[in-house]
Amino acid sequence: MTYYFSKAKDGKAPALVNKTKKVSGKTLYFSNTGKGFISCGNTEGNQAVASVIEGAKLSNSMTQDQKLSVVYNYILNKYNYTISDPADLSSNQWIYTCAYNMFKYGDAKCYNYAALTGLSANALGFNVRFETGVAARSAGGEKTEHAWVVVNDQYVLDSCYDDVNNKSGNQYFYKTYDEIRDSEGSEYQVNKTFTLSD
């Protein structure tokens, strides 16, 4: 069963709650009614996503694609790229840890961007996979370890590259690999793929 996560409003629980969980002194609320956003099944991941959904100020009148664009740009404008150690890719736990660390500490390396962007896209109902490998921002450029997201099996979301490219929000947003290669010259090589069910 899919559970949806909601935060308390004005200190009060949401109207429809099937279960609760206490984390760091805060109560998290879950329902199976479709109110709130889709839970990723991990408490820390849900906390990170809740901060994005709340901060992005989404409205019910927005389409799913519009919500994704607003969330993506919120992440770009909220965080700044910093250099940090690579993530431990031995399991998909890195996704939740990196998203939570970005939310809690502001760490924002490609793994953090991919994790928080992907979990937020999942929360909005997109089919998400997390890809890691090497990438270069220009044809023939230096390839470095990198992480990014693919939604609906074909569209890249690379909020890290958009951040380091002056926070434009559209060069690496919701484009196919071919579109990015043709317009930006960027090259991606996938070494590992992760999903939330791994």
Image (cartoon, rainbow, N blue to C red):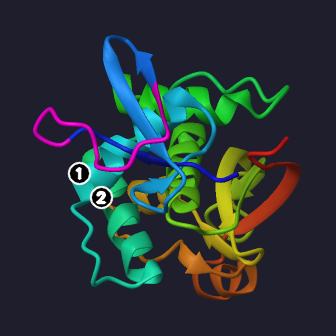
Q: Main secondary structure of the magenta part?
A: loop
Image disc number at residue 55: 1
Q: Contact, CB < 8 Å: mark 2 with mark 1? A: yes
Q: Is residue 42 visible?
A: yes
Q: Which residue is mark 2?
A: 74
Give neighbour class at mark 1: few <14, some 14-19, many 20+ (Cα, 10 Å).
Answer: few
Residue 21 position, x and y percent, is 46, 23
Measuring 71% from the left and 75% from the top, which residue is drawn there? 152
Q: Is residue 80 visible?
A: no
Give neighbour class at mark 2: few <14, some 14-19, many 20+ (Cα, 10 Å).
Answer: some
Element under disc 2: helix
Measuring 84% from the left and 59% from the top, which residue is drawn there? 189
The magenta stretch is 9-20
Residue 78 position, x and y percent, is 26, 47
Measuring 50% from the left and 27% from the top, which residue is drawn there? 44
Quarter of the C terminus within the rendering = top right
Nearer to us in this view, 164 or 43: 43
Instruction: Compute the Cα span from label 2 to label 1.
Output: 7 Å
Q: Is residue 11 above or below residue 131?
A: above
